[in-house]
Image (cartoon, grey):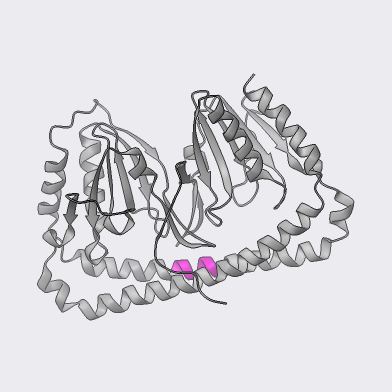
Amino acid sequence: MSAKSLQMKILPGFEEKYFAAVNSREGFISFFGEIFHNLSKLYIIKGGPGTGKSHLMREIAKAAEEHGYRVEYYYCSADDHSLDGIIIRGIEVGVIDGTAPHTRDPEMAGALEDILNVGAFWDSKKLRGQLDEIRILTEKKSQLYTSVYDLLAAAGRVEASARAVSCRALDNKKMTAAAERMLRGIKGNKESSEELRILSCIGMNGEVRFHTFEHMAKHRVLVRNTAGCGYLFLRALHRVAAKQGLHLTVSYSPLDPELEDGLYIHESDTACIFEEHAEEIREGERIINMARFLDGDYLREHRAKLRFLHRSAAEIKKEAILCFSEIQNTHFALEKIYSAAMDFEAKEAFTTDLIAKIFH
């Protein structure tokens, strides 16, 4: 089995794409509670793999766009080809996959949330006949996830060690002054406001990043991630923007969700991202070179150690992605079993009725 490329991939497309969870050094972390809130209606889909949950959301999203609404698409942190949720802006309706690992049950059933049970369209007798195979595949998948999270924890610790070395070279005062200059003259409100939107994941297809902020923004600022310290400038920018009462949308690193890896500043219509994450480098683009704020002599003195730590973290992540490849095979085998037991014609009729109900 060959490892997926560790190079960050910029996915094409025109959807407003995000993730609502991450596979991190702390294990699986869900942000569903922070993202899918303040809605007028939330539909929670229940069902097994391969039962068409993602397709159901895609059909609702298509209908919403045909009705002129803006849709936010939230993809699965393990499989970026599969949807975990959508939010229809304008009517503030959300639809999510409410099964593990981001299990969600209604808190105000009927009044706010409705359950969409796609399990109503499967043949339980057929599934019972494959119970042993389902059990074996499910247990294997669980064991592989344990291995993935052990590896990501190790990679996260090694990367943290590298950052600890690099941070000692930082002139924090100089960096903060640069962040303040960048935001000077941008007027905000008395209180800042902030939205969480995750742009990156580590999953079955390696390290993946959506470039939604770039598509949203009129302006871009690229941060050159020298010695892995780019997040420090984004953090300084985040802190200064909050002090000025600006409205921000913030993305965090999937491996360590305490580290900013992207900002969108609404008042100036500006996306601030790492240079390595940019879809393309445009002529004359503003670039913040972190080397300006770092002691070059100190970094040269510790170059061998930093190179070893960064290479080690990359190799460990490579192994985690290999485990994800095995998870993918196991998951697809489960999907095949459940798909074969589904009455998709009845499910499509249900989808048509549901769409009519949402957009009546």
Q: Quadrant of the N terminus?
A: bottom right
Magenta stretch, residue numbers:
146-153
40 horizontally vs 182: left or right: right
132 horizontally vs 169: left or right: right
Q: Position of residue 151 (x, y in %)?
A: 48, 70
269 horizontally vs 345: left or right: left
Front-most of 247 and 165? Answer: 247
Query: Residue 293 is drawn in which quadrant?
Result: bottom left
Q: Position of residue 205 (x, y in %)?
A: 51, 62
Q: Is residue 148 shown above or below 12?
A: below
Q: Quadrant of the C terminus?
A: top right
Residue 287 visible in rendering: yes
Q: Position of residue 118 (x, y in %)?
A: 74, 41
Residue 105 visible in rendering: no
Q: Residue at x 52, y 65 (%)?
A: 149
Count the marks.
Answer: 0
Q: Residue at x 35, y 38 (%)?
A: 216
Q: Main secondary structure of the magenta part?
A: helix
Q: Residue at x 13, y 36 (%)?
A: 184
Q: Indicate whether residue 63 is drawn in magenta.
A: no
Q: Indicate whether residue 147 is drawn in magenta.
A: yes
**In the displayed image of the protein, which residue is found farthest to the top?**
360
Q: Is residue 159 shown above or below 281?
A: below
Front-most of 134 and 79? Answer: 79
**In the displayed image of the protein, which residue is found farthest to the front?**
283
Front-most of 254 and 156? Answer: 254
Front-most of 198 and 305? Answer: 198
Q: Position of residue 154 (x, y in %)?
A: 43, 71
Q: Residue at x 77, y 33 (%)?
A: 349
